[in-house]
Image (tube, rainbow, N blue to C red):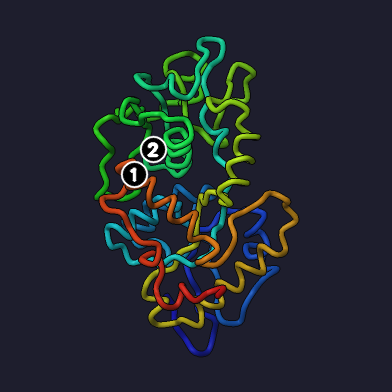
Amino acid sequence: MNDTTVSPLTLRVNLAEYPSTSALRSGAVRSPLVEFDFCGPETAHNGFKAMLRENAFDAGELAIVTYLQAIAYNKPFVMLPAPVSGRQQHHCAGYNSALHSFSPKDIEGKRVGVRSYAQTTGLWIRGILQHEYGVDLDKVTWLTVTDGHLAEYADPPNCTRLPKGSDLGQMLLEGEIDAALLGNDMPQDPRIKTLVPDAIEAGKAWHAREGVIPINHVFVVHRDLTRERPDVVREIYRLLVESRAQSTSKAPLPPFGLEANRKGLTLAIDWAFEQKIIPRRLQVDELFDDVTASLGA
Protein backbone atom coordinates (compact mmCIF):
# COMPACT_ATOMS: atom_id res chain seq x y z
CA MET A 1 0.00 0.00 0.00
CA ASN A 2 1.40 3.36 -1.04
CA ASP A 3 0.09 5.66 1.71
CA THR A 4 0.52 9.39 1.00
CA THR A 5 -1.32 12.53 1.98
CA VAL A 6 -0.55 14.15 -1.38
CA SER A 7 -1.81 11.69 -3.97
CA PRO A 8 -4.49 8.98 -3.92
CA LEU A 9 -3.69 5.70 -2.24
CA THR A 10 -3.08 3.04 -4.90
CA LEU A 11 -4.31 -0.47 -4.11
CA ARG A 12 -3.56 -3.75 -5.89
CA VAL A 13 -7.00 -5.17 -6.60
CA ASN A 14 -8.36 -8.51 -7.82
CA LEU A 15 -11.83 -7.74 -9.18
CA ALA A 16 -13.52 -9.21 -12.24
CA GLU A 17 -15.75 -7.45 -14.72
CA TYR A 18 -19.41 -7.77 -13.69
CA PRO A 19 -22.33 -5.48 -14.53
CA SER A 20 -22.15 -4.23 -10.94
CA THR A 21 -18.38 -3.51 -11.09
CA SER A 22 -18.13 -2.25 -14.66
CA ALA A 23 -18.39 1.46 -13.76
CA LEU A 24 -15.70 1.05 -11.10
CA ARG A 25 -13.33 -0.83 -13.38
CA SER A 26 -13.83 1.58 -16.28
CA GLY A 27 -13.18 4.66 -14.15
CA ALA A 28 -16.70 6.01 -14.63
CA VAL A 29 -16.87 5.90 -10.83
CA ARG A 30 -13.75 7.30 -9.18
CA SER A 31 -12.42 9.02 -6.06
CA PRO A 32 -9.66 11.48 -5.13
CA LEU A 33 -8.81 9.28 -2.14
CA VAL A 34 -8.06 5.96 -3.79
CA GLU A 35 -7.00 4.49 -7.11
CA PHE A 36 -7.17 0.86 -8.14
CA ASP A 37 -4.55 -1.19 -9.94
CA PHE A 38 -6.74 -3.98 -11.32
CA CYS A 39 -3.85 -6.42 -11.55
CA GLY A 40 -5.74 -9.63 -10.82
CA PRO A 41 -6.48 -12.34 -13.38
CA GLU A 42 -9.47 -12.05 -15.73
CA THR A 43 -11.19 -14.87 -13.85
CA ALA A 44 -11.08 -13.62 -10.29
CA HIS A 45 -11.11 -16.99 -8.51
CA ASN A 46 -7.71 -17.71 -10.09
CA GLY A 47 -6.35 -14.97 -7.83
CA PHE A 48 -7.87 -16.10 -4.51
CA LYS A 49 -5.01 -18.44 -3.63
CA ALA A 50 -2.40 -15.74 -4.34
CA MET A 51 -4.34 -13.23 -2.23
CA LEU A 52 -4.41 -15.46 0.82
CA ARG A 53 -1.13 -17.34 0.49
CA GLU A 54 1.13 -14.67 -1.02
CA ASN A 55 -0.51 -11.35 -0.02
CA ALA A 56 -0.66 -10.54 -3.74
CA PHE A 57 -3.53 -8.03 -3.44
CA ASP A 58 -4.56 -5.28 -1.03
CA ALA A 59 -8.26 -5.66 -1.77
CA GLY A 60 -10.74 -7.33 -4.08
CA GLU A 61 -13.23 -10.11 -4.27
CA LEU A 62 -13.23 -13.45 -2.50
CA ALA A 63 -15.74 -16.26 -2.66
CA ILE A 64 -17.82 -16.24 0.51
CA VAL A 65 -16.64 -19.77 1.36
CA THR A 66 -13.01 -18.76 0.88
CA TYR A 67 -13.58 -15.77 3.12
CA LEU A 68 -15.17 -17.92 5.84
CA GLN A 69 -12.09 -20.12 5.72
CA ALA A 70 -9.87 -17.02 5.82
CA ILE A 71 -11.55 -15.92 9.05
CA ALA A 72 -11.39 -19.43 10.53
CA TYR A 73 -7.65 -19.60 9.80
CA ASN A 74 -6.96 -15.99 10.87
CA LYS A 75 -5.97 -14.45 7.54
CA PRO A 76 -5.58 -10.64 7.59
CA PHE A 77 -8.58 -9.63 5.47
CA VAL A 78 -11.86 -7.97 6.41
CA MET A 79 -15.14 -8.15 4.54
CA LEU A 80 -17.15 -5.13 3.47
CA PRO A 81 -20.93 -5.75 3.55
CA ALA A 82 -20.82 -5.50 -0.25
CA PRO A 83 -21.55 -8.70 -2.17
CA VAL A 84 -19.99 -8.56 -5.63
CA SER A 85 -21.99 -11.46 -7.07
CA GLY A 86 -24.73 -13.90 -6.14
CA ARG A 87 -27.57 -15.92 -7.63
CA GLN A 88 -30.02 -18.72 -7.00
CA GLN A 89 -28.22 -22.07 -7.15
CA HIS A 90 -30.94 -24.72 -7.60
CA HIS A 91 -30.05 -25.19 -11.28
CA CYS A 92 -26.36 -25.91 -10.61
CA ALA A 93 -26.63 -29.69 -10.15
CA GLY A 94 -26.97 -31.65 -13.38
CA TYR A 95 -27.03 -35.22 -14.68
CA ASN A 96 -27.08 -36.93 -18.08
CA SER A 97 -30.70 -37.87 -18.76
CA ALA A 98 -29.65 -40.14 -21.63
CA LEU A 99 -27.98 -42.41 -19.07
CA HIS A 100 -30.02 -41.96 -15.86
CA SER A 101 -33.25 -40.66 -14.46
CA PHE A 102 -32.27 -39.14 -11.13
CA SER A 103 -34.08 -37.46 -8.29
CA PRO A 104 -31.90 -35.62 -5.76
CA LYS A 105 -31.83 -38.55 -3.29
CA ASP A 106 -30.56 -40.83 -6.04
CA ILE A 107 -27.06 -39.32 -5.87
CA GLU A 108 -26.48 -41.07 -2.53
CA GLY A 109 -23.90 -43.77 -3.24
CA LYS A 110 -22.97 -42.09 -6.54
CA ARG A 111 -19.97 -40.17 -7.90
CA VAL A 112 -20.60 -36.43 -8.24
CA GLY A 113 -18.08 -34.01 -9.70
CA VAL A 114 -17.37 -30.48 -8.44
CA ARG A 115 -14.41 -28.26 -9.36
CA SER A 116 -13.40 -27.87 -5.71
CA TYR A 117 -15.23 -29.19 -2.67
CA ALA A 118 -14.90 -25.74 -1.09
CA GLN A 119 -16.26 -23.97 -4.19
CA THR A 120 -19.12 -21.64 -3.31
CA THR A 121 -21.51 -23.06 -5.91
CA GLY A 122 -20.89 -26.49 -4.40
CA LEU A 123 -21.63 -25.23 -0.89
CA TRP A 124 -24.98 -23.73 -1.85
CA ILE A 125 -26.31 -26.54 -4.03
CA ARG A 126 -25.21 -29.22 -1.54
CA GLY A 127 -26.99 -27.33 1.23
CA ILE A 128 -30.12 -27.12 -0.90
CA LEU A 129 -29.93 -30.84 -1.69
CA GLN A 130 -29.50 -31.66 2.00
CA HIS A 131 -32.04 -29.32 3.54
CA GLU A 132 -34.68 -29.20 0.80
CA TYR A 133 -34.47 -32.74 -0.58
CA GLY A 134 -33.08 -34.83 2.28
CA VAL A 135 -29.82 -35.87 0.60
CA ASP A 136 -27.23 -37.38 2.96
CA LEU A 137 -24.11 -35.65 1.71
CA ASP A 138 -21.84 -38.11 3.51
CA LYS A 139 -23.17 -40.90 1.29
CA VAL A 140 -21.95 -39.18 -1.87
CA THR A 141 -18.43 -39.54 -3.30
CA TRP A 142 -17.37 -36.04 -4.34
CA LEU A 143 -14.87 -35.98 -7.19
CA THR A 144 -12.80 -32.78 -7.24
CA VAL A 145 -10.42 -31.27 -9.77
CA THR A 146 -8.60 -28.68 -7.64
CA ASP A 147 -7.69 -28.11 -4.00
CA GLY A 148 -8.96 -25.29 -1.79
CA HIS A 149 -7.50 -21.80 -1.73
CA LEU A 150 -6.07 -22.09 1.80
CA ALA A 151 -3.16 -24.38 2.61
CA GLU A 152 -4.63 -25.19 6.04
CA TYR A 153 -7.78 -26.74 4.57
CA ALA A 154 -8.18 -30.41 3.59
CA ASP A 155 -11.20 -31.98 1.87
CA PRO A 156 -13.47 -34.34 3.84
CA PRO A 157 -12.69 -38.07 3.57
CA ASN A 158 -15.48 -38.78 1.06
CA CYS A 159 -13.70 -36.64 -1.56
CA THR A 160 -11.47 -38.05 -4.30
CA ARG A 161 -9.15 -35.93 -6.44
CA LEU A 162 -9.43 -36.42 -10.20
CA PRO A 163 -6.40 -36.15 -12.49
CA LYS A 164 -5.29 -32.58 -13.18
CA GLY A 165 -7.11 -31.07 -16.13
CA SER A 166 -10.17 -33.30 -15.85
CA ASP A 167 -13.19 -31.81 -17.66
CA LEU A 168 -16.26 -32.40 -15.49
CA GLY A 169 -18.67 -31.37 -18.22
CA GLN A 170 -17.19 -33.84 -20.68
CA MET A 171 -17.08 -36.56 -18.00
CA LEU A 172 -20.77 -35.95 -17.34
CA LEU A 173 -21.61 -36.32 -21.03
CA GLU A 174 -19.56 -39.50 -21.33
CA GLY A 175 -21.02 -41.10 -18.20
CA GLU A 176 -17.75 -41.13 -16.26
CA ILE A 177 -19.49 -39.37 -13.38
CA ASP A 178 -23.11 -39.65 -12.32
CA ALA A 179 -23.80 -35.95 -11.72
CA ALA A 180 -21.96 -32.66 -11.41
CA LEU A 181 -22.23 -29.40 -9.50
CA LEU A 182 -21.40 -26.75 -12.07
CA GLY A 183 -22.34 -23.14 -12.47
CA ASN A 184 -21.65 -21.41 -15.78
CA ASP A 185 -19.63 -24.46 -16.88
CA MET A 186 -22.63 -26.79 -17.13
CA PRO A 187 -22.66 -28.29 -20.66
CA GLN A 188 -25.22 -26.69 -22.93
CA ASP A 189 -26.52 -30.03 -24.14
CA PRO A 190 -30.16 -31.22 -24.23
CA ARG A 191 -29.17 -34.44 -22.46
CA ILE A 192 -28.17 -32.52 -19.32
CA LYS A 193 -31.08 -32.06 -16.90
CA THR A 194 -31.14 -30.39 -13.52
CA LEU A 195 -31.10 -32.70 -10.53
CA VAL A 196 -33.62 -30.43 -8.80
CA PRO A 197 -36.93 -30.70 -10.67
CA ASP A 198 -38.10 -27.42 -12.23
CA ALA A 199 -34.96 -25.85 -10.81
CA ILE A 200 -35.56 -22.24 -11.85
CA GLU A 201 -39.04 -22.20 -10.36
CA ALA A 202 -37.79 -24.03 -7.28
CA GLY A 203 -35.15 -21.34 -6.83
CA LYS A 204 -37.74 -18.59 -7.11
CA ALA A 205 -39.97 -20.33 -4.54
CA TRP A 206 -37.03 -20.79 -2.16
CA HIS A 207 -36.14 -17.11 -2.48
CA ALA A 208 -39.75 -16.08 -1.85
CA ARG A 209 -39.79 -18.20 1.30
CA GLU A 210 -36.30 -17.51 2.65
CA GLY A 211 -35.74 -13.97 1.36
CA VAL A 212 -32.12 -14.80 0.48
CA ILE A 213 -30.11 -14.55 -2.72
CA PRO A 214 -27.08 -16.80 -2.09
CA ILE A 215 -23.86 -14.79 -2.03
CA ASN A 216 -21.07 -15.94 -4.35
CA HIS A 217 -18.33 -13.32 -3.93
CA VAL A 218 -17.81 -10.49 -1.45
CA PHE A 219 -15.39 -7.54 -1.42
CA VAL A 220 -12.58 -7.64 1.15
CA VAL A 221 -9.71 -5.37 2.15
CA HIS A 222 -6.48 -6.08 3.98
CA ARG A 223 -6.85 -5.61 7.73
CA ASP A 224 -4.08 -3.00 7.76
CA LEU A 225 -6.17 -0.77 5.52
CA THR A 226 -9.11 -0.61 7.94
CA ARG A 227 -6.71 0.20 10.79
CA GLU A 228 -4.63 2.81 8.98
CA ARG A 229 -7.08 4.34 6.48
CA PRO A 230 -10.70 3.82 7.52
CA ASP A 231 -11.58 6.81 5.33
CA VAL A 232 -10.39 4.86 2.28
CA VAL A 233 -12.40 1.79 3.29
CA ARG A 234 -15.55 3.90 3.60
CA GLU A 235 -14.76 5.43 0.21
CA ILE A 236 -14.37 1.99 -1.39
CA TYR A 237 -17.80 1.04 -0.10
CA ARG A 238 -19.27 4.23 -1.57
CA LEU A 239 -17.68 3.47 -4.92
CA LEU A 240 -19.06 -0.08 -4.91
CA VAL A 241 -22.54 1.26 -4.15
CA GLU A 242 -22.29 3.82 -6.96
CA SER A 243 -20.91 1.29 -9.43
CA ARG A 244 -23.78 -1.12 -8.79
CA ALA A 245 -26.27 1.74 -9.12
CA GLN A 246 -24.98 2.39 -12.65
CA SER A 247 -25.48 -1.22 -13.76
CA THR A 248 -28.22 -1.84 -16.32
CA SER A 249 -28.49 -5.53 -15.46
CA LYS A 250 -31.85 -6.69 -14.12
CA ALA A 251 -30.43 -9.81 -12.48
CA PRO A 252 -31.16 -9.74 -8.74
CA LEU A 253 -28.14 -9.50 -6.42
CA PRO A 254 -27.70 -9.84 -2.67
CA PRO A 255 -28.22 -6.47 -0.95
CA PHE A 256 -25.54 -4.26 0.58
CA GLY A 257 -25.30 -3.82 4.37
CA LEU A 258 -24.56 -6.15 7.27
CA GLU A 259 -28.08 -6.60 8.61
CA ALA A 260 -29.55 -7.03 5.14
CA ASN A 261 -27.15 -9.95 4.62
CA ARG A 262 -27.24 -11.47 8.11
CA LYS A 263 -29.59 -14.33 7.21
CA GLY A 264 -27.69 -15.23 4.04
CA LEU A 265 -24.35 -15.10 5.86
CA THR A 266 -25.74 -17.24 8.67
CA LEU A 267 -26.85 -19.85 6.14
CA ALA A 268 -23.42 -19.83 4.48
CA ILE A 269 -21.72 -20.31 7.86
CA ASP A 270 -24.08 -23.07 8.99
CA TRP A 271 -23.80 -25.01 5.76
CA ALA A 272 -20.01 -24.57 5.54
CA PHE A 273 -19.67 -25.99 9.05
CA GLU A 274 -22.06 -28.87 8.34
CA GLN A 275 -20.15 -29.70 5.17
CA LYS A 276 -16.77 -29.73 6.99
CA ILE A 277 -15.47 -26.73 5.02
CA ILE A 278 -14.71 -24.64 8.13
CA PRO A 279 -13.43 -26.10 11.42
CA ARG A 280 -15.85 -24.23 13.68
CA ARG A 281 -19.19 -22.45 13.42
CA LEU A 282 -18.40 -18.76 13.05
CA GLN A 283 -20.57 -15.84 14.13
CA VAL A 284 -21.69 -13.34 11.50
CA ASP A 285 -20.21 -10.44 13.47
CA GLU A 286 -16.75 -12.08 13.28
CA LEU A 287 -16.74 -11.42 9.54
CA PHE A 288 -16.49 -7.64 10.04
CA ASP A 289 -14.54 -5.15 12.13
CA ASP A 290 -15.77 -1.88 13.62
CA VAL A 291 -15.15 0.01 10.38
CA THR A 292 -16.77 -2.41 7.93
CA ALA A 293 -19.67 -3.38 10.21
CA SER A 294 -20.90 0.21 10.18
CA LEU A 295 -20.92 0.58 6.39
CA GLY A 296 -24.38 1.07 4.97
CA ALA A 297 -25.94 1.30 8.44
Residue 136 image-quadrant placement:
top left
Instruction: Residue lying at the far bottom in this picture: please name it.
Output: 5
Disc 2 marks which amino acid?
Ser
The quadrant in which the N terminus is found is: bottom left
Disc 1 marks which amino acid?
Gly
In the visual, does 133 lie left or right of 97?
left
Query: Which residue corresponds to the image point at 53% horizontal and 25% vertical from the top-left?
Result: 195
- Helix, strand, or loop for circle 1? loop
Q: Are marks 1 and 2 in contact (CB under 8 Å)?
A: yes
Q: Which residue is mark 2?
A: 116
Crowding around mark 1 (Cα neighbors within 10 Å: few <14, some 14 to 19, many 20+) is many
Instruction: Residue lying at the far top in this picture: please name it.
Output: 99
Give whichever of 202, 214 is nearer the camera: 202
Residue 116 image-quadrant placement:
top left
Counting residues from the N terminus, which is met first, the one under dot 1 or under dot 2? 2
The answer to whether residue 47 of the structure is visible from this angle is: no
Q: Whole-percent x and y of residue 189? A: 62, 20
Q: How many marks?
A: 2
Instruction: Residue lying at the far front in this picture: please name it.
Output: 209
The answer to whether residue 43 of the structure is visible from this angle is: yes
Query: Which residue corresponds to the image point at 43% horizontal and 23% vertical from the top-left?
Result: 105
Q: Whole-percent x and y of residue 44? A: 50, 51
Give whichever of 165, 241 is nearer the camera: 241
Q: Which residue is mark 1?
A: 148
Give whichever of 207, 119 is nearer the camera: 207
In the visual, does 44 lie left or right of 165?
right
Any mark on residue 297, and which? none
Query: Which residue corresponds to the image point at 61% horizontal and 71% vertical from the top-left?
Result: 239
Give whichever of 28, 252 is nearer the camera: 252
Q: Whole-percent x and y of residue 138? A: 31, 30
**Above or below for 250 versus 56:** above
**Above or below for 157 versus 297:** above
